[in-house]
């Protein structure tokens, strides 16, 4: 499935504003995060499991167990963002 992944605050600084990602279905937000971490480099550092990261699916806050659908938009951001 094709997804749009957006990053905000410090994650945006590390990874850029957005990217298109392909992931095998079925998948969850947590599986997407793990796939991005598996890329290594900046993704592994910014999205590491020891870092607090919030997520949203199609503009609604979700936990990592949320199921993904083709064409979904997933956003990752730190727990506190500036305004």
Image (cartoon, rainbow, N blue to C red):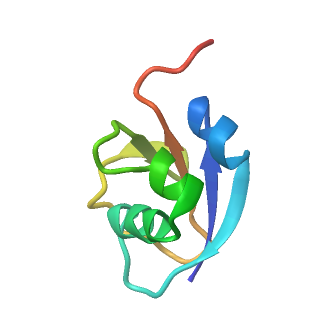
Report x, y in % for residue 19. Answer: 70, 61
Q: Quadrant of residue 32?
A: bottom left
Q: How many marks?
A: 0
When the figure is inspected, residue 10 is found, relative to residue 57, above or below; the finding is: above
Quadrant the N terminus occupies: bottom right
Q: In which quarter of the image is residue 66?
A: bottom left
Q: In which quarter of the image is residue 82?
A: top right
Report x, y in % for residue 67. Answer: 35, 68
* Residue at (34% x, 39% y) in the render: 51
Quadrant the C terminus occupies: top right
Looking at this rendering, what residue extends furthest in the front direction?
41
| 24 left or right of 5 in image | left
Report x, y in % for residue 52. Answer: 33, 36
When the figure is inspected, residue 42 is found, relative to residue 14, above or below; the finding is: below
* Residue at (46% x, 32% y) in the render: 78
Report x, y in % for residue 43. Answer: 54, 56
Looking at this rendering, what residue extends furthest in the top direction?
83
| 27 left or right of 2 in image | left
* Residue at (33% x, 62% y) in the render: 30
Q: Nearer the viewer, residue 9 or 74?
A: 9
Q: Which of 14 and 75 is in front in this view?
A: 14
* Residue at (43% x, 86% y) in the render: 25
When the figure is inspected, residue 21 is found, relative to residue 60, above or below; the finding is: below
């Amino acid at each position: 499935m094709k997804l749009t992944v957006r990053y905000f605050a410090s994650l945006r600084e590390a990874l850029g504003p957005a990217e298109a990602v392909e992931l095998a279905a079925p998948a969850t937000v947590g599986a997407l995060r793990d796939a991005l971490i598996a890329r290594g480099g900046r993704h592994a550092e910014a999205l590491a499991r020891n870092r607090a990261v919030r997520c949203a699916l199609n503009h609604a806050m979700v936990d990592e167990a949320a199921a993904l659908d083709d064409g979904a938009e997933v956003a990752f951001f730190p727990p506190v963002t500036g305004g």
